[in-house]
Image (cartoon, coloured by chain):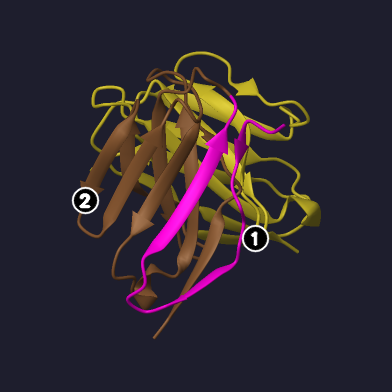
Chain colours: A yellow, B brown
């Protein structure tokens, strides 16, 4: 099946710094990618929809200036957590739907962010 | 009422048992249905994908969709300890670039 690669898988950063997470679709083009956040033992919470060549669409309650999304190509979207704080510590997961196939959604491996 | 309801469990079964996981939904426009398996600290892995109503089988896994009842199921036959994970149902109304709506996930534990 299609593969979505997410990097890094784990990152620890100091409070106040920024962290960039990359999401790549390896064998299909994704005009749209999705960023989720997952708290322990909770389901995935959609943060934003990343659109290639245009601005991302953020879900209610998600700060767009805090979570910067750039979808510069048909295979790459990035999420930058700016001025990170301990409450931003979470598991972040990206997803893309294979529109050239039958529309299945594939997920990256996730990024465990810890802000100290 | 939430769009997708899924009993979070936990569900504990002995090895070899048949497991039944279910979700109900309220949006009659949903047509694409997926089941994901998620191990701790990993991204969700697509298990089954079904369009509209009907059954789909893949190895020990069978997915069923009953659109008239707005009810989907995932059956796992001959369950193994390696099946212990969280299972998430997900669905959407269209194939285009829209995000999936997820259930909360059911935590399954298969004991040897």
Q: Is residue A72 left or right of residue B24?
A: left
Q: Which residue is mark 2?
A: B58
Name the subunit of mark 1: A
In the rendered image, the quadrant that contains the C terminus of chain B is bottom left
Q: Nearer the viewer, residue B80 or A105?
A: B80
Q: Secondary structure at mark 2?
A: strand
Please indicate, yes or no, whether residue A107 appears anywhere in the rendered image: no
Disc 1 crowd, CA 10 A, few/some/many (<14, 14-19, 20+): few
Q: Which mark is residue B100?
A: none
Q: Which residues are magenta?
A: B1-26
At 44% from the left and 40% from the top, the residue drawn is B72
At 65% from the left and 54% from the top, the residue drawn is A42
Q: Secondary structure at mark 1?
A: loop
Residue A28 in which image quadrant: top left
Decide whether residue B24 is among the magenta residues.
yes
Decide whether residue B14 is among the magenta residues.
yes
Q: Which residue is mark 1?
A: A41
Tell me how far mark 1 sits from mark 2, CA to CA.
27 Å
The spot of residue A46 in percent (x, y) is 61, 35
The spot of residue A62 in percent (x, y) is 74, 32
Residue A64 in which image quadrant: top right
Q: Are marks 1 and 2 in contact (CB under 8 Å)?
A: no
Q: Can you say whether A79 is above or below A32 in the image?
A: below
Q: Residue furthest front?
A: B69
In the rendered image, the quadrant that contains the N terminus of chain B is top right
Q: Can you say whether B35 is above or below B77 in the image?
A: above
At 23% from the left and 36% from the top, the residue drawn is A27
Please indicate, yes or no, whether residue A72 appears anywhere in the rendered image: yes
């Amino acid at each position: 099946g299609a593969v979505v690669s997410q990097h890094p898988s784990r990152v620890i950063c100091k409070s106040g710094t920024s962290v960039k997470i990359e999401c790549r679709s390896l064998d299909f083009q994704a005009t749209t990618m999705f960023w989720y956040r997952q708290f322990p033992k909770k389901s995935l919470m959609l943060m934003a929809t990343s659109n290639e060549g245009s601005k991302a669409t953020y879900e209610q309650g998600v700060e767009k200036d805090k979570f910067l999304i750039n979808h510069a190509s048909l295979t790459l979207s990035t999420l930058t957590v700016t001025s990170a704080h301990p409450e931003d510590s979470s598991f972040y997961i990206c997803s893309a739907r294979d529109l050239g196939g039958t529309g299945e959604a594939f997920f990256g491996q996730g990024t465990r962010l810890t802000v100290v | 009422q939430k769009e997708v309801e899924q009993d979070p469990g936990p569900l504990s079964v002995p090895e070899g048992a048949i497991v039944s996981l279910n979700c109900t939904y309220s949006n009659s426009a949903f047509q694409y249905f997926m089941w994901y398996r998620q191990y701790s600290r990993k991204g969700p892995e697509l298990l089954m994908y079904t369009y509209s109503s009907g059954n789909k089988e893949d190895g020990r896994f069978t997915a069923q969709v009953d659109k008239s009842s707005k009810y989907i199921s995932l059956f796992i036959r001959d369950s193994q300890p390696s099946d212990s994970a969280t299972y998430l149902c997900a669905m959407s109304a269209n194939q285009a670039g829209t995000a999936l709506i997820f259930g909360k996930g059911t935590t399954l534990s298969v004991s040897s």
